Amino acid sequence: MKKFDVIIVGGGMIGLSLVVELSKKMNLSVAIIDPNDCNPTINDSFHTRVSAITPSTQDFLSSINVWDKIQRKKGFSATKVWDQNSHGHLNFYAKDEGIKYLGYIVENDLIQSVLFNAIDQSKVSMINAKLVGLTKTDIGYTVNLENGESHSCKLLVGADGSRSKVRDLTEIQVTEHDYHQKAIIANIVSEKPLMNTTWQRFLSDSILAILPLSDHQASIVWSCKETLANELETKDKTIFSKMLSEASEYQFGVLELESSKKSFPLVSRTAKEYVRANLALIGDAAHNIHPLAGQGANLGFSDVIELSKQLVENNDKLLGDFHVLRKYARARRLDNEMMSKTMTGLDWIYKENNEPIRWLRGYGMNLIDETPILKSFFQRQALGKVSKK
């Protein structure tokens, strides 16, 4: 049995960023446990899983010296939202906040790859195995793996996604909200340029987000009622492309499917406990939300920033001290739950199509759009704490 200071279960973007951050700021022995290869293969073509990286997340990735190593990233200087069932629209611009970009659309695999390559392999143990059991000890946890190995740690971090094995094995309860929707993701080519803008259209039975990867290529996230999603999944390339073009009102001319389609059910989950003694959950293991605003990855990176901050500032305490970990949980829970409830509320508002709700929705959108103080407030909430560039 090997003894580590910290064991992180989950070698995705969030888990790897915590490793890099801790290695930079603290002298700890760290292990990452993941059954999959944590260093994805990068292809010439765009991957379909992307994130809208905010300036605050960009600042964090820059601080750990990985941002400039991401070779493909598309800055967007505007976000435009329009509604099928009212005359409502919202337009956000980076120049209004004195910054160049509102954010960047980046493939998740690219972020994960640069984080993996930033790890000092001489200081961090990569363990390619499946977690099967956990035992609480007086000083931390013993981790049991499918390959028969066992390892111990003073701090166990669950960064293993929305179906977290760490969360399950420690019997931390979750609250769930099933939206009865699916998100269909794919990459598309547009006839007209996307103009460095992310686009979102609210329809009666779905929400279509178009996230630019280049001037004429984009990733789409089409959040649909299950009946529509099931129908779209069966359509061939030609019919799907036509339905997609119609859903966007031909705003970009004809949209053509470029990749295979993938889908996943939309269910938000929140862990009732982010922490216990010697244990912390981060990222989707602690909370995952509706993809409406593309904030999931940014919330996870914010967890990493806060957890590492508390560990560094309280390094005179025992690693895994519950009171230290509780400071992390208190700092992050409000932001995460506010974002989750906001997404649930917005989803409800845009699904309701009776006349009074439609009128109110359109009026509210236009009011925000035409009121600089209101618009700036909402925009800066989405941007996070930003240093102007």
Image (cartoon, rainbow, N blue to C red):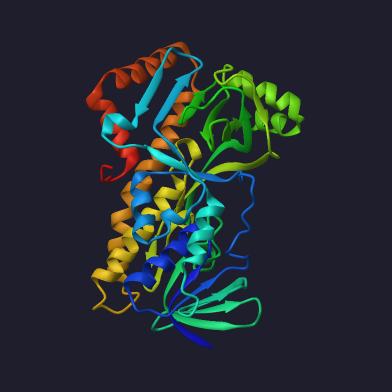
Residue at (27% x, 33% y) in the render? 97
Q: Is residue 261 above or below residue 165?
A: above
Q: Which one is nearer the viewer's eye here, 277 or 301?
A: 301
Residue 171 coordinates in the image, percent (x, y): 50, 65
Residue 345 coordinates in the image, percent (x, y): 41, 32
Left or right of 374, for residue 271 = right
Q: Is residue 25 above or below residue 306?
A: below
Q: Is residue 280 visible?
A: no
Residue 152 coordinates in the image, percent (x, y): 48, 82
Q: Is residue 308 above or below residue 189?
A: below
Left or right of 243, for residue 2 = left
Q: How many marks?
A: 0
Q: Which one is nearer the viewer's eye here, 54 or 332?
A: 54
Q: Which one is nearer the viewer's eye here, 287 or 301?
A: 301
Left or right of 330, for residue 133 = right
Image quadrant containing the C terminus:
top left
Image quadrant containing the N terminus:
bottom right
Residue at (52% x, 47% y) in the render? 72
